Amino acid sequence: MSEKIVEVAAAVMLRANGREFLLAQRPEGKVYAGYWEFPGGKLEAGESVRQALVRELHEELGISVTECAPWLTRQFTYPHATVRLHFWRVTAWTGEIGITAPLEHAAVDWMECGKSASVAPILPANDPILKGLALPTRMAITMAESEGVERQLERLEEALNAGLKLIQVREKHWPQARRLWFAEAVKRLAHDHGALVVINDDAEVARLVGADGLHLSSSGLAACRERPDFNWVGASCHCAAEIHRAGELNLDYALLGPVLPTPSHPENPGLGWDGFAEHLTGNTIPVFALGGMNQALIDQAQAHGAHGLALMRGW
């Protein structure tokens, strides 16, 4: 008989425009007392994940959630149980933590996304979540083939000065020497601004320029048998099965699209937001919305489960 999986709602509470998240310390008398975790708890009979999340945060922290959305799902086996953790982003609430109602945790503390946590120990199931929170929510995809190198580098510098932190170098059809030169120029510019660079489908170029990671095309994902040896690895996906495959390989993120019509393919209506959300059911890694995106769509994308936006034009 297979072991029963315990369904758990877990809250990734965000403040400071998503730059900080909350961890809570398990109290004495509970399994793993003293460990830090994302607040939340088990689903009760008949509850949806959202209902459980709202109830648990009211009971544990004394707050009332007003804005939340699904993010990703992870399964983890502890010695005492196998849990399926449904992580939801919580971006707005009323009440003050531990003031509006008694705090059920031993302590709570705010952490900065992308920095080493200042508390320990943290429950091991949360390691991929901490890395996911370090992933920027806006990815710029280069298009120097059509826009021209000089203009592309100018636009990248403008975007980096405005806060861009993740770039995918995509120029697939250039000779490798030219691609290598451009990737090196982008990497230098990005690293001067503390931003990450991933190279599309060319592990050799990624290694030669010292890029932060590799981005697999959907065909590259299909051919992949193990995670490439880079700090950050993602993939372009077109369906739930490809997202599932990226999760099996323990990749760090996926792109899914097209969501909306694009200038290059205006006749293709895309998945639409509801279709996009359907493909994310049970996703284990952060997923960016791709296709017809602009920065004004970030809230809509995240309300439908996206980690953020991947943009070719509207950086």
Image (tube, rainbow, N blue to C red):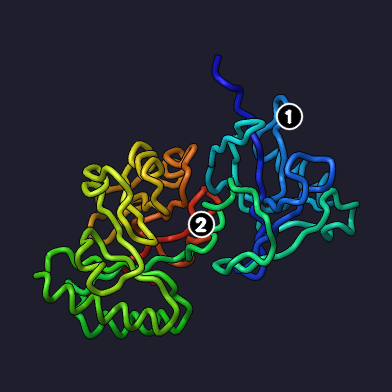
Mark 1 highlights which residue?
44
Mark 2 highlights which residue?
132
Label 1 neighbourhood size at 10 Å, few (<14), some (14-19), many (20+)?
A: few
Q: Which amino acid does label 1 sit on?
A: Glu
User: Which of these two is toward me, 84 or 276?
Assistant: 84
> Where does the N terminus fall, quadrant-wise?
top right
Q: Which residue is drawn at 57% across and 35% down?
A: 77
Q: Residue at x 27, y 48 (%)?
A: 268
Res 164 visible: yes
Q: What element carries label 2?
A: helix
Q: Which picture quadrant has residue 238?
A: top left
Label 2 neighbourhood size at 10 Å, few (<14), some (14-19), many (20+)?
A: some
- Give the left or right position of residue 298, taking residue 257 as reference: right
**Rounded to the nearest whole Å, what is the CA distance between mark 2 and mark 1?**
27 Å
Q: Position of residue 299 (x, y in %)?
A: 54, 59
Q: Which picture quadrant has residue 12?
A: bottom right
Label for residue 254?
Answer: none
Q: Residue at x 32, y 52 (%)?
A: 235
Q: Where is residue 118 in the image (x, y as percent from the top left)?
A: 67, 67
Q: Which amino acid does label 2 sit on?
A: Gly
> Where does the C terminus fall, quadrant-wise?
bottom left
Quick check: 278 above or below 129? above
- Give the left or right position of residue 16, taking residue 260 as reference: right
